[in-house]
Image: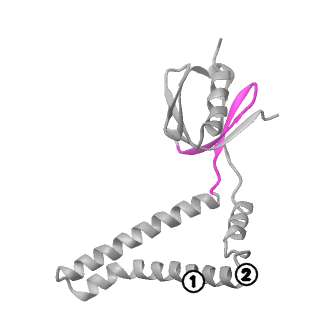
Amino acid sequence: MIMTSVDYVHSRPGGRVQLSFTPHHIAVSTSPTRSRDWVRRFWWSVLGALALAWIGTLAHWSGAPREVAIALAAPGGVLFACLLGYALIALVIAIFTLGVGEAGMGWLGRWIDRNATPAQPLGVIPVGAVAHVRAERRFRRTIAHVTFSDGRTVRYTRWGFRHVGKPMVAGFQAMTPL
């Protein structure tokens, strides 16, 4: 029976994992890509496209050939046009429904989460393998430096408020010898 499960944990070395703490071991598995990951990727791509548009504009102002400026600025312009179209659709829906209706994309997020690949097991950490745990808190990050009995140290980081990272630290500390 799983006691606690913590998702979206960044393991260094390693990658993003899901930790499941039981009284006898810690099960480590991959963390599935969910809708909030796609939202984050979308906004990073928006920033990248706007940076390209700005670089294209600067290139045009500095006298570069027009084709080069257009090739750099086009992705940013297309993305901006799509965002502007979505904003206009949301505004029209809000006007016609008197603010009750919303042009949200919640259905897309639920569909992505429902169709996400399930977590794949990576390994198990037995009770005696954790020698020492040092926890620290930086802004909205909870960091657990876990030293194993073989001497290697792995840093596990969980972003979020304090109550989100506390179960991770408590689970690792429960695995240390008394």
Disc 2 is placed on an element classified as loop
For the residue marked with disc 2, what is the amino acid? Thr
Image location of residue 3, percent across then percent down: 77, 33
Towards the viewer: 15 or 75 = 75
Q: Main secondary structure of the magenta part?
A: strand
- Tell which circle, 1 or 2, labels the residue nearer the N-terminal end: 1
Disc 1 is placed on an element classified as helix
Which stretch did the figure color magenta?
A: 15-33
Q: Nearer the viewer, mark 1 or mark 2?
A: 2
* Quadrant of the image containing the N terminus: top right
Quarter where residue 115 is shown:
bottom right
Residue at image point 17% right, 83% down = 63
Disc assigned to residue 97 = 2
Q: Label 1 belongs to which residue?
A: 88
Could you classify mark 2 by the number of other residues whose Cα lies within 10 Å: few (under 14), some (14-19), or many (20 or more)? few
Image location of residue 119, percent across then percent down: 69, 49
For the residue marked with disc 1, what is the amino acid? Leu
